[in-house]
């Protein structure tokens, strides 16, 4: 299993250490760039907020580097973040990516 997760600030450092301690191969998400926003915007609804667009591109680029498992964050909070895991799954499936999705709430 090669796993990744969204690039949320410095959280990727702890995430990488955690999964490696569990014996998993981790491919950290790429740092955000102009390309991140362009690709994320291309595959996301224009009305969706910036964090989802960034996460989608993080996942796409990680899949292209060999990731087969993605830890998707989610929530039941007051904004769209509560629906991210569902939207991300549909977007990735529509793009033809066959990866396992692990949900974290």
Image: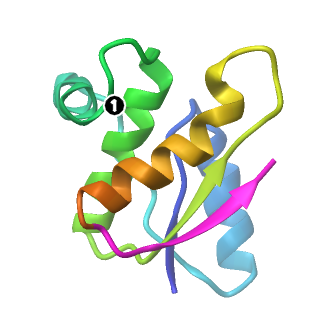
Residue 41: x %, y % from top left: 25, 25
Residue 22: x %, y % from top left: 75, 82
Q: Is residue 104 visible?
A: yes
Residue 5: x %, y % from top left: 54, 54
Query: In the rendered view, would you say 96 is above or below 44?
Result: below
What are the residue bounds of the magenta stretch?
A: 97-105
Q: Tell me which residue sits at (19%, 22%) in the image.
A: 34
Q: Quadrant of residue 81?
A: top right
Q: Is residue 10 left or right of residue 51?
A: right
Q: Tell me which residue sits at (52%, 87%) in the image.
A: 1
Q: Is residue 29 visible?
A: no
Assess whether residue 45 is covered by the magenta stretch. Answer: no
Q: Tell me which residue sits at (72%, 31%) in the image.
A: 82
74, 58: nearer the viewer: 74
How many discs appear? 1
Q: Secondary structure at mark 1?
A: loop
Q: For label 1, count other residues whose C-alpha is less than 10 Å away and answer few (under 14), some (14-19) or many (20+).
A: some
Query: In the rendered view, would you say 56 is above or below 28?
Result: above
The color scheme shown is rainbow
Assess whether residue 99 is covered by the magenta stretch. Answer: yes
Q: Tell me which residue sits at (67%, 87%) in the image.
A: 23
Which residue lies under the disc numbered 1?
A: 32
């Amino acid at each position: 299993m090669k796993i990744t997760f969204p690039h949320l600030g410095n959280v990727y450092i702890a995430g990488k250490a955690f999964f490696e301690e569990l014996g998993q191969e981790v491919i950290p998400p790429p740092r955000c760039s102009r390309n991140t926003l362009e690709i994320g915007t291309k595959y996301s609804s224009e009305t969706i907020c910036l964090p989802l667009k960034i996460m989608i591109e993080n996942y796409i680029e990680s899949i292209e580097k060999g990731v087969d498992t993605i830890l998707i964050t989610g929530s039941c909070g007051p904004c769209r973040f509560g629906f991210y895991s569902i939207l991300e799954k549909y977007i990735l499936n529509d793009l033809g990516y066959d990866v396992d999705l692990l949900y974290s709430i």
